[in-house]
Amino acid sequence: MARIYNFCAGPAVLPLEALQEAQADLVDYKGSGMSVMEMSHRGKEYDAIHNEAIANCKELLGLGDDYALLFLQGGASMQFAMIPMNFLGKSQSADYINAGSWGAKAIKEAGLIGNVNVAADCQKDIPTRMPELSECNWTDGAVYAHITTNETISGAQMKEIPKVEAPLIADMSSDILSCPRDYTQFAMFYAGAQKNLGPSGLALVAIKKEFAARGNVGLPSMLRYQSHMEENSLLNTPPCFGIYMLCLTTRLLKQKGLEKVYAENREKAALVYNTLDASQFYRGTAKRDYRSDMNITFRLPSVELETLFIKQASEAGMKQLKGHRSFGGIRASIYNAFPIAGVQCLVDFMRDFEQRNG
Ligand SMILES: Cc1ncc(COP(=O)(O)O)c(C=O)c1O
């Protein structure tokens, strides 16, 4: 077996142990004679997986009975639409922070439904960053405030969560469960699974029950948080295999503990940032205070050198280092499951490449 070092921003590397366990159980799940892909979502085997996945997430996130943990389809992008459809009524207004492409997408979708106030906008800033809390103009009476904790494309991460009057909603697609956080400061948060949790298509949504109950009752059931909540995310056939994979990855996270996961993530990120800081050749693209632990973005002196860097890294077994097509440069995504040996391999390669081309 030859596994590459996969720096993809998502779908991203998953823990090898989880993949191997899924492989071992693929055609006959624990003696049931069926694959998880073939079994009823109302049967006892799947029921146990579903409820363990929910319990694992709630435990890791430190959420009590006042929160519902939902598994929904349509990825994180569906949440960009469902949030305003549920909570942004006529003549109301919602606050959004725009610090990158994902915040901008959320704003665009919400604007189709209702009135959006952009409380701070630093999307186009280079070096890329998150807004200072002092520059945010929150609206009195906003029905919610929406933030993106980690901008996956540009590589900026929010280090301090703003304190706001309005119920706070966060897109945590690219840094959920990468660090301990007080997750109870949010009325709701969500994440596409394909970075730190499991396969794509599935979104984890955590929502305060009391907040979900405020949602628009006129919506079709599949678009209402309350109806998913009432049916424990079994309103229709859920993405069972994705939830099973998430169950396996969260089981591993629980074994390690979030503090340790975070310490490892910090260590991995520091290896790359220290290499950038020690060099006149590489230039990090995020402002120091907002450097993402998950997606590290940097430039080389020319686009030609970047192309050569990506090609030679790929030949050395380090794949998917090309920056997002809208942003250019290099992006190393190093989520929870990315091994430290792979980061070491990258920084060794960076030093060697600089020596040969600097
Ligand atoms: C921060 C953030 N939000 C939203 C999305 C969209 O997720 P999905 O493709 O699951 O809709 C992504 C995907 O990369 C993301 O990084």
Image (spheres, helix red, strand yellow):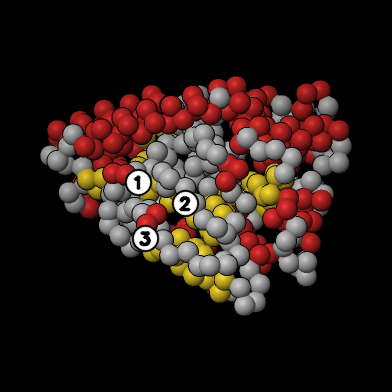
Q: Count of labels shown?
A: 3
Residue beneath the point at 60% across and 39% down? 198
Camera-near label (2 vs 1) is 2
Q: Could you tell me the amino acid type at mark 1?
A: Tyr
Q: SS at mark 2?
A: loop
Give the side of residue 261 with respect to residue 50, left or right: left
The residue type indicated by label 3 comes to Glu
Q: CA distance from mark 3 to mark 2?
A: 11 Å
Q: Earlier in the sequence, mark 1 or mark 3?
A: 3
Q: Earlier in the sequence, mark 3 or mark 2?
A: 3
- Above or below, comparing residue 91 to residue 323 in the picture: below
Tell whether 138 sits left or right of 207.
left
Say whether marks 1 and 3 touch (CB < 8 Å): no
Q: In the orientation shown, which residue stands out farthest toward the bottom? A: 91
Q: Residue 317, can we see it? A: no
The image shows residue 13 at horizontal and vertical percentages of: 50, 36
Please tell me the numbered disc located at residue 162. 2
Give yes or no for contact between labels 3 and 2 (Cβ–Cβ under 8 Å): no
Which quadrant of the rendered structure holds the C terminus? top left
Q: Amino acid at mark 2?
A: Pro
Q: Residue at x 65, y 47 (%)?
A: 206
- Residue nearest the viewer, comparing 52 with 44: 52
Label 1 crowd bin: few (<14), some (14–19), many (20+), radius 10 Å: some
Residue visible at 56% across and 74% down in the picture: 115
In percent of width and height, residue 232 lies at 79, 46
Specify the farthest residue to the right: 43
> What residue would you read off at disc 3?
135
Q: Is mark 2 within 8 Å of ligand 1?
A: no
Q: Which residue is mark 1?
A: 290
Compared across the picture, whether 78 is left or right of 127 comes to right
Q: Decide which of tag 2 and tag 1 comes sooner along the chain.
A: 2
Residue density around tag 3, few if under 14, some if 14–19, many if 20 or more, within 10 Å: few
